[in-house]
Image (cartoon, rainbow, N blue to C red):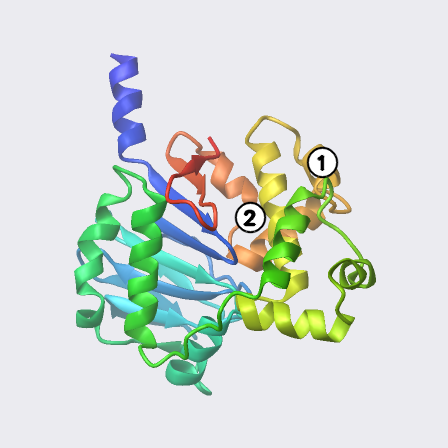
Amino acid sequence: MNDARNKNNRSNASVLFFFNGQALFIGQGTDAAPHTHHVLQITIGLKENFRICRDDEWISARYAITGPDTSHRLEGPDSGQAILLLDPENRVTENIKDKFLGTTSMAFPEFESVRPFAGELNRLSGKPSCQTARAAMEGILSALVPDLKPSPGRDPRIMKVRAYLKTLEEKKIPLSELSDFIGLSESRLVHLFKSETGIPIRRYLLWLRLMEALTLILENVSFTTAAHDAGFSDSAHLSRTFKQMFGIPPKQILKNSQFVQAISCPEQYPDCKPFN
């Protein structure tokens, strides 16, 4: 009986996908208190409206964009929400901010533009798939900014840099050393890396360290050891950085791990690599 119950709980678990500089949460999004994080948040009610609070005003919505560093609170019904968290320095995020937010902190686009993706997102909690999650995210972002200029072709030098960074035991390296490795000036490397990937190179290194730390934690390594091994000064530094990047502390993922499945999605592969 317990096995059956656990299996049922797992099948109904919330799921949290991690991509490069992005995250996608599928489940019931409820924030007990107002909070602020450094990522841009896109919230979609999968079957019905949710309520979101800004400046002490509760707003009922099916689709909302919350700007970075905006204090807010979310109350989501049991039917679930999809919450996209985007690095504020990403090229797509910058376009979304320019188009929808401007001088305001929250926007409410027409839900019809993303309705085709709601059913697909809802099914991800029962059958997690990096490929499906990535396709849905790209579809939503394309619906928001269909006129986004395409990324330039992949520069082999930046591909070489990214491959090299992943081989480093500790994902920390001076830019001077990296520029010597690739044969570019530091300023040229910084500019070209963001132009090619949409994310600054220092933020990309931070992303790699965060993923390494989270992988260690979910392998039952202590927060302190995982933080040090991944290049953070201590567990508090790790927690602060993680929350700044994704809006939630890592311990929140692990608090009820039987109900929250965290999945790392490789950049170029359709299969999932579950953390837990």
Asked if residue 24 is positioned above or below residue 154 in the image, the reply reads above
Write down the quadrant of residue 53 in the picture. bottom left
Gap in Å between the C-alphas at discs 1 and 2? 14 Å
- Identify the residue at the far top of this view: 1
Identify which residue is drawn at 50% across, 61% down: 35
The secondary element bearing badge 1 is classed as: helix
Q: Give the quadrant of the N terminus.
A: top left
Dot placed on the residue nearer the N-terminal end, 1 or 2: 1
Q: Amino acid at mark 2?
A: Pro
For image coordinates 21% across by 71% down, the residue present is 113
The numbered disc on residue 54 is: none
Position of residue 154 in the picture relative to residue 73 (left or right): right
Give the number of callouts.
Answer: 2
Residue beneath disc 2: 249
Q: Name the residue at 55% across, 48% down.
A: 249
Classify residue 16 by image quadrant. Answer: top left
Label drawn at residue 224: 1
Q: Is residue 168 left or right of residue 70?
A: right
Please tell me which residue is depicted at 46% across the width and 72% down the height of the picture. Answer: 151
| Pick the front one: 58 or 65 | 65
Name of the residue lying farthest toward the bottom: 103
Label 1 sits on what residue type?
Thr
Residue 222 versus residue 52 in the image, above or below: above
Residue 153 seen: yes
